[in-house]
Image (cartoon, rainbow, N blue to C red):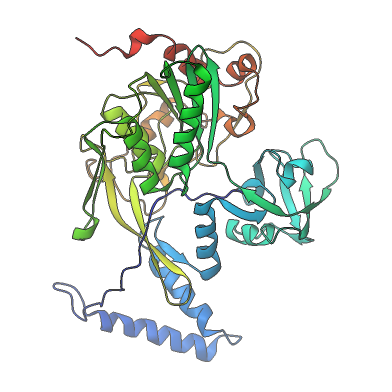
Amino acid sequence: MCVVFGAALVFGGRDLPEVSARESGKSNLFEELKVFTDVLSVVKRDYVSDIENKRIVEGAIKGMLGTLDPHSGYLDPDFYQDLQVQTKGEFGGLGIEITIKEGLLVVVAPMEDSPAEKAGVRPGDIIVKIDGKFTKEFSLVDAVKRLRGPKGTPIEISLSRKGAGDLIDVSIVRDIIAVRSVKARYLGDGFGYVRVSQFMEHTADDLKTALKTLTKDSSLPELRGLILDLRNNPGGLLAQAVKIGDMFLKEGVIVYTDGRVEAQKQKFFAHARGTEPEYPMVVLVNSGSASASEIVAGALKDHGRALILGQQTFGKGSVQTITPLENGGALTLTTALYYTKSGNSIQARGVKPDIEVDISQGVQKEPVQTRRSPMSEIREEDLPGAIENPSVKSGEKGDGDALRKLNKTEVVAPDVASINPETVDLVEWGKKDPQFQRAFDLIKTFTVFKAPS
């Protein structure tokens, strides 16, 4: 299974700071805490059943962090361990990407050659039961915990599939799932394509390897052009986004962060060493491109290094610092906003493409295979408690809201997950994916990328 977290993550192990008893101009913290202890006392004394102290404390922590913003929260030990496994890109499981939609556990796509794909699991299947237990009340974390497990252990899931009258029971044996965050395809005539699906520990190294392979396949000293696909990429590790930005930029600021604490004010620069040749580039984005993927797209756009094509991005412009706790869990806290070279904050606004292409443009009359991305139906600015963009006046909405008002229907994206760029027929790919086809047409027109005199 592949569950990713839409965040630019920084793992840290700083000591927890002491909290002053009194804050200037604010009420005494310990006076406020008395209300909490009063409530705690009543709950422990009068609730219909005895509750474990751990449950009460964790619930209080989650409630406190839930009042801050959508991306701050408490990670219990199991969830934190899962996050660490996710960023490493290898775990025991079935090999399916899942999401929660309208309360249902939906399969986004099975991974190629995974146990789930071999067992016949399809995109759009609804997982109704896991080992006989209904999933209706499961959170995404609950589902992840149940579906993952040691290699060789069996699991049974019951699927609801469109067109099938009854539930489909599927028995699957778990295996080691190595998540590939980079897929590449040589398009011919010196042109290459790379899809980065998330930013994990080895993503930058894998991208570098893919680019070397594409160059070798071209039999040219360097590529004539590259399409970098960041659609439906929810983010991941900030350090990996910076490394990938550095691959294509010789100098200047890639991204900088600004927070209340001095340690959160950082600038990340590009260096000439190891930079790719300045071949033409098109970066594909959509409303599912978030956080670390927006850092890369925003940096390449601000430096004029690449043409951005597709749909406005999600608008996740904040950095979360993860602080491990003594109980094995962790605190994830929004500690800064990130800004592009020009000083623009992406928070709640996103990256606006240079060329906007929706799924209906530039394709033949065959039906276009699409799916609604979990992140396409809502953007950062719509999330309860979302931090406002610093450059937008209070109460105003960003460009994403205006964009959706122009298009009354929900934003949909080509079914990127179902198109394997390594094996799909190039002509069929263009029919199914107009954004890719437009990018391919543009990348072959070198004059588009010539700098103005």
- In the picture provided, is 323 more to the left or to the right than 261? right
Residue 342, image quadrant = top left
Q: Position of residue 213 (x, y in %)?
A: 51, 27
Query: Camera-side residue: 223 or 107?
Result: 223
Q: Position of residue 249 (x, y in %)?
A: 29, 31
Number of dots carrying numbers: 0
- In the picture provided, is 13 more to the left or to the right than 156? left
Q: Position of residue 198 (x, y in %)?
A: 49, 42
Query: Camera-side residue: 167 or 293?
Result: 293
Residue at the outermost right position = 166
Residue shown at the point (26%, 28%) measured from the top left: 303
Vertical comparison of 332 with 167: above or below: below
Q: Is residue 350 visible?
A: no
Q: Position of residue 176 (x, y in %)?
A: 67, 53
Query: Camera-side residue: 291 or 101?
Result: 291
Residue 160, image quadrant = top right
Residue shown at the point (52%, 70%) measured from the top left: 77
Quarter of the image with the C terminus in it: top left
Vertical comparison of 143 with 435: above or below: below
- In the picture provided, is 24 more to the left or to the right than 360? left
Residue at the outermost left position = 24
Vertical comparison of 2 with 260: above or below: above
Residue shown at the point (53%, 64%) measured from the top left: 81
Residue at the outermost bottom position = 45
Query: Camera-side residue: 275 or 289?
Result: 275
Q: Is residue 333 visible?
A: yes
